[in-house]
Image: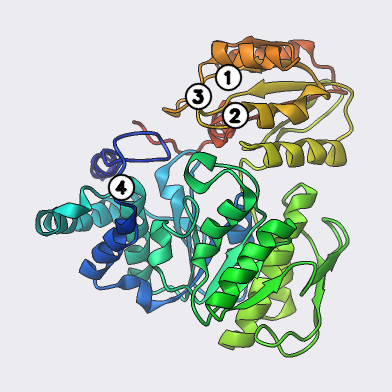
Amino acid sequence: MTEDYARALQDILALPDWERGAGARPTRAQLFLERPAALLDALGNPQTRFRSVLIAGTKGKGSTAALLENILRAAGYKTGLFSSPHLHTYRERIRVNGELISKSEFARGVGELQPLCAALLATRPAFEVFTTFEAMTALALNFFARQKIDFAILEVGLGGRLDATNVVDADLALITPLSFDHTQVLGDTLPKIAFEKAGIIKPNKIVLSAPQAPEALQVIENVARAKNATLGVGERDWLWLGGHENFMVAAEPRAGLWNGYWRVENLRVPLLGVHQLVNAALAVAAAQTMRANWKLKLEEAAFRTGLAKTEWRGRLEILQERDATQPFIVTDGAHNGASAEKLVAALKFHFEFDKLFLIFGALRGKNLDDILAPFVAPTTRAWTIETQQPRSWRADALAQALNEHGIAAQAAANIQAALDNARALASPRDLICLTGSLSVAALARAAFGLARETDAL
């Protein structure tokens, strides 16, 4: 069965994949939704057999999805989670009740898709080709239907308006904080990016948004109004107080969202960073909306248990605790300017340290100026690495970029060499951070023996 899985994974990765920069992308934007819709129709439209929440945004999509999924699961509902990217295995992207799709089910799903894709391309040549993400989306939705889930939590891959996940007529849309990323595809201004993200809003349905910059919120409001959708916004329609160990979310009555006052308190949010409190509040508001509009049984205990049990690895994850002989070592997948700013702020908030040592890798197509700017002041020394991601920058090119930004850096042969160099200089009062891409976080976790399974490609 391992061989079947490996073959299936090779087949699905042989398709064009924007994420890895592999293959030629289909050229007709008007078919970006028609193509996955046709594939799902050939499967019998499995996405209609359960209710869905669709999540778009620049940062926090995965964390918000994980938080909400855990709340629903703690209440006894059967959940499906579709997220990207993964850390160690593609199977992480498709989960039911927190469990990864099995190798046999993954291989079965790919086997079901292959003849359908071939038939559709033969009869509709304008489709050109199906992409890896389109196939993964169809595989996930079909698997969820087979597993008879109650709710699917779906994370948008890129943008929203033309993303394959947007073929799902989601009952609830969530928009996490917006900033600049993938500007060559989504646009180089916040209003342009917001328009693409707001494309997930469905007519006459509900959309909840985290707090946004005014120019981005105005676009979201305009799209919601045009689609007669009910819009709720964080810091306007729900508020939160406290910290990670004593968190509270509360709201007044809001027509179309919930009828009465509500407050959920004594919450614990284990995901580090103040930005995760924004995500947790959005997840709580989403669950309250679902309870009020879908008549769910959600007791306060489900909120407390669900949030407290949430794990989202590779996001400000502590790999090594500080003791008398060694420093903190943490990793995070920050890969744009806004996330780098949040990471540096979180490091200062959660950890006391004298010197910051940075191990950095990044993908081509990212704005290095924006990512590196927050690290210039606090970083004592850095080492750059190349990851296994096809779009990874070479270590020597990254080291040159860091030095040009005023960060003393040198290229390392691999992540273990970088860790050895950092440990040789760091005292127990210092901190070592590995970041710049989720592929760096994956290598970091593997170096600490935390990758229980890694796809062999």
Q: CA distance from mark 4 to mark 1?
A: 31 Å
Tag 4 near tag 1, CB within 8 Å: no
Task: Give the class, few, some or many, for how many residues have Cα within 10 Å of label 1's Cα (few <14, many ≥20).
Answer: many
Task: Give the class, few, some or many, for how many residues have Cα within 10 Å of label 2's Cα (few <14, many ≥20).
Answer: many
Which dot, 2 or 4, sits closer to the camera? 4
Residue 94 higher or lower than 342, as above or below:
below
Say which residue appears at 57% left-offset and 29% top-offset.
Answer: 440
Q: Find disc 1 in the rendering and name its residue.
A: 415
Say which residue appears at 55% left-offset and 81% top-offset.
Answer: 228
Q: Can residue 73 be spotted in the picture?
A: no
Residue 246 higher or lower than 118, as above or below:
below
Q: Find disc 3 in the rendering and name its residue.
A: 387
In the rendered structure, the answer to whether residue 117 lies left or right of residue 163 reads left
**Local secondary structure at mark 3:** loop
Q: Amino acid at mark 1?
A: Ile
Tag 1 near tag 3, CB within 8 Å: no
Task: Give the class, few, some or many, for how many residues have Cα within 10 Å of label 3's Cα (few <14, many ≥20).
Answer: many
Q: Amino acid at mark 3?
A: Thr
**Local secondary structure at mark 1:** helix
**Residue sitting nearer the eye, 397 or 285:** 397
* First of labels 1, 3 by sequence position: 3
**Local secondary structure at mark 4:** loop
Q: Find disc 2 in the rendering and name its residue.
A: 444
Residue 4, how many percent across, how many down? 23, 44
Q: Amino acid at mark 4?
A: Thr
Q: CA distance from mark 1 to mark 3?
A: 9 Å
Which dot, 3 or 4, sits closer to the camera? 4
